[in-house]
Amino acid sequence: MTQQANSTSKTATAIAHPNIALSKYWGKQTFGHNLPAVPSLSLTLRGMQTKTSVTFDGALASDAFELNGQPAEGVVLQRVTQMLDRVRALGGSAERAHVVSSNDFPTASGLASSASAFAALATAATHALGLQLSRDVLSDLARRISVSAARSLFGGFVELRAGVPSDEALSANEVAGPDFWDVAIVVAVTREGAKDVGSSDGMKHTRDTSPYYKAWVDSAPATFTHLRAGLLERDLTKMGPAIEQSALSMHAGALAANPAILYFSGATVEVIHAVRKMRAGGLEGYLTIDAGPHVKVFTRGADAEKVAAYLASVPGVLRTITARPGAGATVVAG
Ligand code: DP6
């Protein structure tokens, strides 16, 4: 973070990028506050962003949140207020805030909007109150509201270990910066609009009812360790099968919940088959899928355009977004 907050205006604006997990987080520990049950490894992306402005104002009776031009209420506003309450406690303030946020990519659809949202909010809100916090502290703050948001504080490849009972704080950690490796993630967008089951609810339901949840928690650390090693060797061929196994095991656990959670649409399955066919034809890329119907393909930077063209031709794919490694959350005004 490069700019000083202006403590007299109590306003600041930050941007943050979504991150896509190559080794997935799915499930919270039963102890502690919002601690992940498994380690995760993600890539922070440029090419998609959340921009959030926070203004603390003593004249406001309550927090107000405007998302993509619409006033937000209910659970969405509650989560924003939870973050603001933590920031107010840190800054010794009782003032309510007006928060204006916009995403330039589909919101709440499995494109990791909560990650960029809470990374940007933690960054903007603390700066608005004049707090100068390290990225580690901001990552921990973001993690308390949304685990994946802890990773968007950092750029490039980012890890977050599983929580342990003694954790009083838990922050993500940069494994390799955005310039470490020329790679891309190509998103095949298969539906516009919000998803059916949010990730927080979906992972709780999986933990509570899926007989495969324990197998997921037991197997995820080895997948993570393999992927991390492959990343440090810049070895796409080594990482690829583990990337797909992480995502598909996560979904297998959710599918085995009672009742089942199914994030895939028909087009999702079409894209899974297409990616296998693409590889068989010599174009290397590996898929991952979050809590939504879109398919994201991790590939070499030099192959990104070819992969995007391939995915765009799959029936049911509405459009593609090509994203490359990006930076962590940043204050842009304040
Ligand atoms: C499938 O971070 O959105 O994207 O901690 O409850 O806010 P909460 O969940 P969230 O879950 C993200 C799940 C995922 C995988 C990942 O990003 O690791």
Image (cartoon, grey):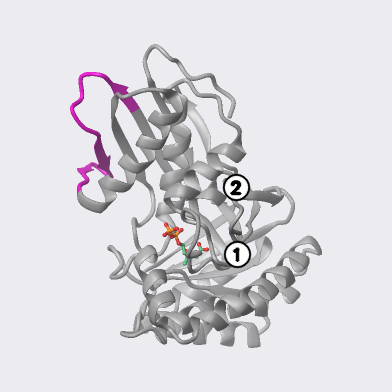
- Residue 10 found in image quarter: top left
Residue 23 location (% of width, % of height)? 60, 68
Amino acid residing under circle 1: Ala
Judge whether residue 102 is colored magenta.
no
| Residue 176 is at least partly visible in this image | yes
Q: Residues within 10 Å of mark 2 (few under 14, many from 20)?
A: many
Which disc, if any, is residue 217?
A: none
Nearest to the observer: residue 149 or residue 185: 149
Which disc, if any, is residue 171?
A: 2
Q: Relative to residue 120, is residue 59 depicted above or below?
A: above
| Residue 18 is at least partly visible in this image | no
Instruction: Left or right? Give the position of 60 relative to 280.
Output: left
Q: Secondary structure at mark 1?
A: helix
Q: Secondary structure at mark 2?
A: loop
Residue 291 location (% of width, % of height)? 41, 69
Nearest to the observer: residue 150 or residue 236: 150
Q: What are the residue bounds of the magenta stretch?
A: 55-73
Marks 1 and 2 in Cβ contact (< 8 Å)? no
Image quadrant holding the N terminus, namely top right
Instruction: Left or right? Give the position of 303 relative to 109.
Output: right
Viewer-side label of 1, 2: 2
Q: Relative to residue 189, is residue 278 depicted above or below?
A: below
Image quadrant holding the C terminus, namely top left
